[in-house]
Image: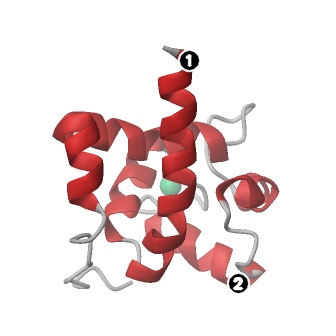
Amino acid sequence: MSTSQKGVEFQDFLPTMANKLGGEGLIGELCNGFQLLMDVDRGLITFESLKRNAALLGLQGLKDDELRSMLSEGDMDGDGALNQMEFCVMMFRLSPDLMEESEVWLEDALQQEFNDL
Ligand SMILES: [Ca+2]
């Protein structure tokens, strides 16, 4: 497992989000993605729950093996699923390409959140 990957390019994306939310709000928002993806019964993101919910997040273009590699990338304790902490850490290590796609659903999620207020 590669833990030395550096240079994730958040530069385009983070300032906008940070302005809207503040630093802690931004982290909270990224972690909220966990709620959308998790298997409600287990409270974990499993391959099945990730696959089931990927389309919600605009990630339906990802193939099974890409979803699996997302999981194994983030899975630090080796149980084959992501808990919230693992997911949050993974969000910060995602590839720039994926962040670009995620920006769309994050914007949507933000919109909904603001609408709810
Ligand atoms: Ca895990």
How far across and how far down the image is residue 104, in percent? 54, 59
From the viewer's perspective, tell me whether residue 5 is left or right of residue 91.
left
Give the number of callouts. Answer: 2
User: Which residue does the numbered mark 2 point to in the structure image?
Assistant: 65
Q: Which mark is residue 53?
A: none
Distance from label 1 to label 2 (Cα)?
Answer: 36 Å
Say whether mark 1 is within 8 Å of ligand 1. no
45 is higher (above) or lower (below) than 80: above
How many other residues sit within 10 Å of disc 1, few (<14), some (14-19) or many (≥20)? few
Residue 82 in sight: no
Q: Which mark is residue 116?
A: 1
- Quadrant containing the N terminus is bottom left
Give 56 or 42, whichever is nearer the viewer.
Answer: 56
Classed neighbour count for the residue bearing mark 2: other residues with Cα under 10 Å, few (<14), some (14–19), many (≥20): few
Residue type, numbered disc 2: Asp
Q: Nearer the viewer, residue 64 or 113?
A: 113
**What residue appears at the point 55 percent right and 23 percent down from the top-left corner?**
115
